[in-house]
């Protein structure tokens, strides 16, 4: 007597949710460990990443007697911003949004023309490179308010007593601040 072959069991409809499939595939304890690792890595990257904590690549400059601040800046991308450069005159440093006093740089978020967009991108990378050269000082100008209308801290950024804003002006990537604006598209 011939035995009838069984038909293969059909997969469950819809395949279940991602988490149900993951539980079946790797087990509950392994999934819990994986989630914990993901949370730890995510929190570490929010605070600046392993590189900022253990001084591994990328190189982080050390503070000096004249300049107390030091960090490795990247270009800001995404929603989580901790230490990065937004544009040629605005940075995030240790979770605070800071407007560099004394200059006005072209916009990158809403440029008025292609020239402003190109200059804004160059100014952003130039400011990042200048900040990454070494330690710097953030100081409050006594004549300015502490924050601007966009709730950014207003700070002068210097290195060995010299304002870094002057380098951007010298490179043609920023102008001295004036209320009317520079008119990058004129």
Image (cartoon, rainbow, N blue to C red):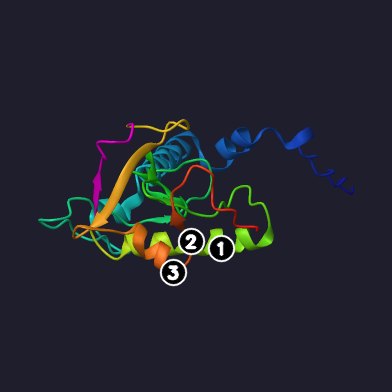
Asked whether residue 84 is in view, the answer is yes
Between the residue at mark 2 and the residue at mark 1, the CA separation in whole angstroms equals: 6 Å
Circle 1 is placed at which residue position?
119
User: Is 69 contained in the magenta span?
Assistant: no
Q: Which residues are magenta?
A: 136-145
Contact, mark 3 vs mark 2 (Cβ under 8 Å): no
Q: Residue sitting at 42 percent across and 33 percent down?
A: 148
- Please provide percent x and percent y for residue 42: 42, 42
Q: Residue sitting at 44 percent across and 35 percent down?
A: 32
- Provide the major secondary structure of the magenta segment: loop
In this rendering, would 167 be left or right of 162? right
Contact, mark 2 vs mark 1 (Cβ under 8 Å): yes
Q: Neighbour class for label 3 at 10 Å: few (<14), some, many (≥20)?
A: few
Q: Residue sitting at 55 percent across and 58 percent down?
A: 120
Report the label total. 3
Q: Which residue is the extreme one toward the bottom? A: 171
- Please provide percent x and percent y for residue 183: 59, 53
Q: Nearer the viewer, residue 140 or 49?
A: 140
Q: Which mark is residue 84?
A: none
């Amino acid at each position: 007597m011939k035995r009838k072959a069984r038909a293969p069991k059909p997969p469950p409809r819809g395949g279940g949710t991602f988490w149900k499939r993951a539980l079946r595939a790797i087990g509950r304890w392994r999934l819990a460990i994986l989630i914990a690792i993901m949370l730890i890595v995510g929190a570490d990257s929010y605070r600046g990443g392993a590189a900022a904590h253990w001084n591994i690549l990328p190189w982080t400059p050390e503070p000096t007697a004249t300049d107390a601040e030091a960090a490795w800046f990247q270009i800001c991308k995404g929603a989580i911003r901790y230490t990065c450069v937004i544009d040629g005159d605005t940075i995030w440093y240790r979770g605070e949004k800071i407007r560099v006093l004394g200059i006005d740089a072209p916009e990158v978020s809403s440029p008025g023309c292609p020239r402003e967009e190109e200059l804004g991108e160059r100014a952003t990378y130039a400011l990042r490179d200048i900040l990454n050269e070494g330690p710097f000082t953030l100081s409050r100008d006594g004549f300015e308010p502490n924050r601007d209308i966009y709730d950014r801290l207003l700070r002068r950024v210097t290195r060995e007593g010299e304002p870094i804003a002057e380098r951007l002006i010298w490179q043609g990537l920023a102008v001295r601040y004036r209320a009317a604006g520079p008119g990058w598209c004129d």
